[in-house]
Image (cartoon, rainbow, N blue to C red):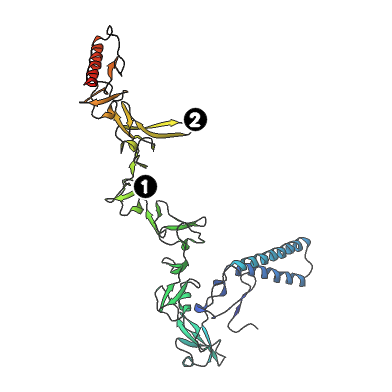
């Protein structure tokens, strides 16, 4: 005889006993051990079938061979069962029976009734009503508590929350069902799951915190077109340069920010020609660059010169544009002797300076053949220069005598 209230199923479907009403909602054990029961069922059925064939008459060789194969498969399945059982975390079983013997419902605790196996039995056992389960108080007595149905439900015991929300990831805190620290509530599943932030390891998509997230190759990521926020607990819509935005973290382009609700480059960077990148602004001549705009932003009359070194590496540096030269890490216009100038740095020729708006030779030098020189040339070729040179000598001598 079997246990009271248990039904026996035959080989071919299920090969184990199913409790009639031992748990909340009278759910059979395969609800809790679904990863194990089918394998176990098939294996045990095969073993029983093998025993029956031994009591029958001798079967043909082909059938005996098939029976041997079936037994081998059963052994392999039992081995697989052992492996799976070691890795499957079994859910907690919530008992409905309070273990009180009864004759009438009045003899049972609140929210329980007297359950009899059949009409023949005079006595029965108190069982909690649907949606309730038995818990043991501090005085070792059982009573029926209502199972929570959602986060925030009123509770007195952890089991009330764990029945619906999760066995290991929920608890009764301040008489309210909440997820434990390190877990979060998934609305679509109505359960608590262990929390994995974006970029962290995950087993399930439900582990990934925030909407528009999923578990890809064991890592929590955002869905296409979105990216993690700074705290890595939420996915934000990608906003490129020129797109509307409300926070800096929405802008996905490197070195960009949200300014006046538009994604633009940071103050230390400038928009490139294709308007899809932010490039660093050069501060002085010879700084690294990729485009002219990087140099021109702070250095007028400059350009980005791309060269390839002897090591084969191509790089750009800010240099002065044509008809300009470098002076104090800046670019100034190049002016030759007698040309119009604004500052001394304009005069590019040797021994020249800007005097009264023109580049002239410095003191004690004279212009000879378009250059500044201190030597006196033949009066035959440059008589005017000779006269000036003699005058300068006489004036210098007079000053010495005086």
Q: Is residue 28 visible?
A: yes
Pinpoint residue 296: horizontal percent, then vertical percent. Answer: 31, 36
**Extreme front residue here?**
401
**Extreme top residue here?**
380
Residue visible at 55% across and 75% down in the picture: 28
| In-front residue for pair 378/30 | 378
Q: Evaluate if marks 2 and 1 touch, with contact meaning CB atoms under 8 Å apart.
A: no
The residues tagged by marks 2 and 1 sit, at their Cα atoms, a distance apart of: 32 Å
Disc 2 versus disc 1: nearer the observer: 2
Q: Quadrant of residue 63?
A: bottom right
Q: How many neighbours does mark 1 have within 10 angstroms: few (below 14), some (14-19), or many (20 or more)?
A: some
Q: How many neighbours does mark 2 have within 10 angstroms: few (below 14), some (14-19), or many (20 or more)?
A: few
Secondary structure beneath disc 2?
loop
Viewport quadrant of the N terminus:
bottom right
Which of the numbered marks, if any, corresponds to residue 255? 1
Pinpoint residue 191: horizontal percent, then vertical percent. Answer: 45, 69
Q: Earlier in the sequence, mark 2 or mark 1?
A: 1
In the rendered image, the vertical position of residue 189 relative to residue 225, given as above or below: below
Pinpoint residue 356: horizontal percent, then vertical percent. Answer: 20, 26
| In-front residue for pair 98/369 | 369
Residue visible at 33% across and 28% down in the picture: 325
Residue 87 lies left or right of residue 66; in this view the side is left
In this figure, which residue is indicated by the disc labeled 2?
310
Secondary structure beneath disc 1?
loop
Q: Quadrant of residue 8?
A: bottom right
Viewport quadrant of the C terminus:
top left
In the rendered image, the vertical position of residue 114 relative to residue 324, given as above or below: below
Residue 190 lies left or right of residue 393; in this view the side is right
Q: Is residue 273 visible?
A: no
Pinpoint residue 311: horizontal percent, then vertical percent. Answer: 50, 32
| In-front residue for pair 134/15 | 134
């Amino acid at each position: 005889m079997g246990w009271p209230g248990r039904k026996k199923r035959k080989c071919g479907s299920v090969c184990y006993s199913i409790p009639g009403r031992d748990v909340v909602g009278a759910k059979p054990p395969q609800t809790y051990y679904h990863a194990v029961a089918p394998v176990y069922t098939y294996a045990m059925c095969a073993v029983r079938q093998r025993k029956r064939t031994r009591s029958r008459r001798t079967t043909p060789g082909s059938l005996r061979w098939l029976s041997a194969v079936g037994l081998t498969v059963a052994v392999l399945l039992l081995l697989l069962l052992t492996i799976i059982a070691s890795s499957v975390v079994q859910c907690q079983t919530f008992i409905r029976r309070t273990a009180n013997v009864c004759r009438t419902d009045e003899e049972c605790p609140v929210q329980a009734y007297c359950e009899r196996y059949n009409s023949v039995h005079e006595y029965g056992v108190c069982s909690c009503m649907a949606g309730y389960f038995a818990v043991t108080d501090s005085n070792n007595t059982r009573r029926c508590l209502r199972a929570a149905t959602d986060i925030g439900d009123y509770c007195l015991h952890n089991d009330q929350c764990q029945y619906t929300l999760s066995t290991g990831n929920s608890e009764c805190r301040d008489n309210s069902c909440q997820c434990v620290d390190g877990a979060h509530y998934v609305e679509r599943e109505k359960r608590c799951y262990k929390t994995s932030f974006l970029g962290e390891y995950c087993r399930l998509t439900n582990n990934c915190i925030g909407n528009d997230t999923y578990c890809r190759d064991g890592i929590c990521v955002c869905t296409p077109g979105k990216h993690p926020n700074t705290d890595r607990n939420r996915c934000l819509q990608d906003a490129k340069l020129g797109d509307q935005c409300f926070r800096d973290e929405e802008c996905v382009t490197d070195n960009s920010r949200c300014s006046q609700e538009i994604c633009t480059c940071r103050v230390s960077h400038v928009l490139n020609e294709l308007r899809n990148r932010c490039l660093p602004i050069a501060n002085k001549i010879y700084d690294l660059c990729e485009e002219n705009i990087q140099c021109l932003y702070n250095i007028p009359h400059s350009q980005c010169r791309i060269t390839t070194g002897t090591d084969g590496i191509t790089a750009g540096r800010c240099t002065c544009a044509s008809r300009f030269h470098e002076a104090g890490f800046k670019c100034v216009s190049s002016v030759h002797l007698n040309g119009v100038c604004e500052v001394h740095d304009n005069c590019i020729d040797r021994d020249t300076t800007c005097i009264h708006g023109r580049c002239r030779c410095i003191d004690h030098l004279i212009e000879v053949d378009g250059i500044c020189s201190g030597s006196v040339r033949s009066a035959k070729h440059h008589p005017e220069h000779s006269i000036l040179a003699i005058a300068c000598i006489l004036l210098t001598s007079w000053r010495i005598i005086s």
